[in-house]
Image (cartoon, grey):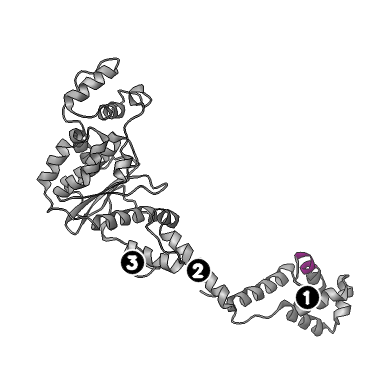
Amino acid sequence: MNTAPAEAFPVGEHLLEELEARGWTQVEFAEILGRPAQFVSEIISGKKEITRESAAQISAALGSSPEYWLRYQDQYHLWRQAQDENTRRQLDEVRLRARLNELAPLAVLRKRGVITATTIQGQADQLCQLLEIEDIHDQPRLPMAARRSNVGEQVSPTQLTWLACVRRQAEQQHVSRYSADRLRALAEQLSREVRVPSAFADLPARFAGAGVRLVHVEAFPSSKIDGASFDMDGTPVIGLSGRGHRLDKVLFTLLHEVAHIVLNHIADEVILDEDNPRGRDREQRANELATNWALPGPLPAIPERIGQAWLTNTANVLGVHPIVIVGRLQNSGLLSWRSALAKDPPTVTRYLKDW
């Protein structure tokens, strides 16, 4: 509701009316205040503003409050500002910038080249396209994000923007018809096939053969997103943030999202996996399936003192990178997170960025 006055008047005019009502001249009023006559004349003519000190003196003389005179003066200045076209345009831009930052992490989108426009209106248009809304004041509701599995929480603006970036990138991919059998077969062999970090470079093409769009969108600051999976017009989509960096962590997130797809969890909702406990039934089932895929075969007897030789030999027998076994032992509490065996682990970030 707009409570601004239709018209306001200078505080000097109002002060002059008060003096005339009392029959006081400006010189007499100046004497009452203990001020020079020029001081009163400049306030009435608008050359000088009322300060906190002079407001206190005027109110003492006229029986009003200091706040009354300061508020009257501010109201007039604000009204004058509102009449200025340049000021109105500047304030409209401030409101628009505030709305853009309310909807999305705009600075991150600009830095990553998602938003490229140099004008504020151009940025608003591009953000509308990304979030699939007609007007910047609409509330984004991407179909894929209508529901989610994670503890009943709503998707935050930052998460929603990340999902929108995943969707946009996925739309550019051409994939085969989806096959659950081909996807499951791929998942069962994945740990062996990515025994070296460079093998991650070929994964989008491999998943495209199974009818799945696989994309990488780096997580936005503070979003703590690991990955997501959802259905897009009948085609499964997996988005990875690569937040874990380490080969085994990114691999497990990918397998976790594959499990959601194979288990048909994305039929009616988006699966957004974040840095929080996975206690719900669907998450637990996906976790178990991904765990089985990540390490294709049982571990041999684990020695009391786990050394590099045992680790290397076991990795060779199972056909996986040693860091996958290290990750399993760490998650099981059988190996310290500070273990020397996990020193300088292989990362896959550079290959994800080429997707």
Distance of mark 2 from mark 1, alpha carbons? 33 Å
The residue wearing badge 2 is 93
Q: Position of residue 136 (x, y in %)?
A: 39, 67
Q: In this view, does 269 lie to the left or right of 57?
A: left
Distance of mark 3 from mark 1, alpha carbons? 51 Å
The residue wearing badge 1 is 43
Going from N to C along the chain, the mark reached first, 3 or 1, is 1
Which is closer to the viewer, label 2 or label 3?
2
Magenta includes 221? no
What residue lies at 15% left-to-right and 51% top-to-bottom?
Answer: 211
What residue lies at 88% left-to-right and 70% top-to-bottom?
Answer: 34
Q: Dot 2, how many residues are within 10 Å of its Cα: few (below 14), some (14-19), or many (20+)?
A: some
Quarter where residue 168 is shown: bottom left
The residue wearing badge 3 is 133
Q: Where is residue 107 in the image (x, y as percent from the top left)?
A: 45, 55
Q: Position of residue 77 (x, y in %)?
A: 66, 74
Q: What is the magenta segment's predominant secondary structure?
A: helix
Which is closer to the viewer, label 2 or label 1?
2
| Rendered view: 2 above or below 149 | below
Q: In this view, does 100 lie to the left or right of 211?
A: right
Task: Check the image and name the residue furthest to the top.
Answer: 304
The amino acid sitting under disc 1 is: Ile
What residue lies at 29% left-to-right and 53% top-to-bottom?
Answer: 166
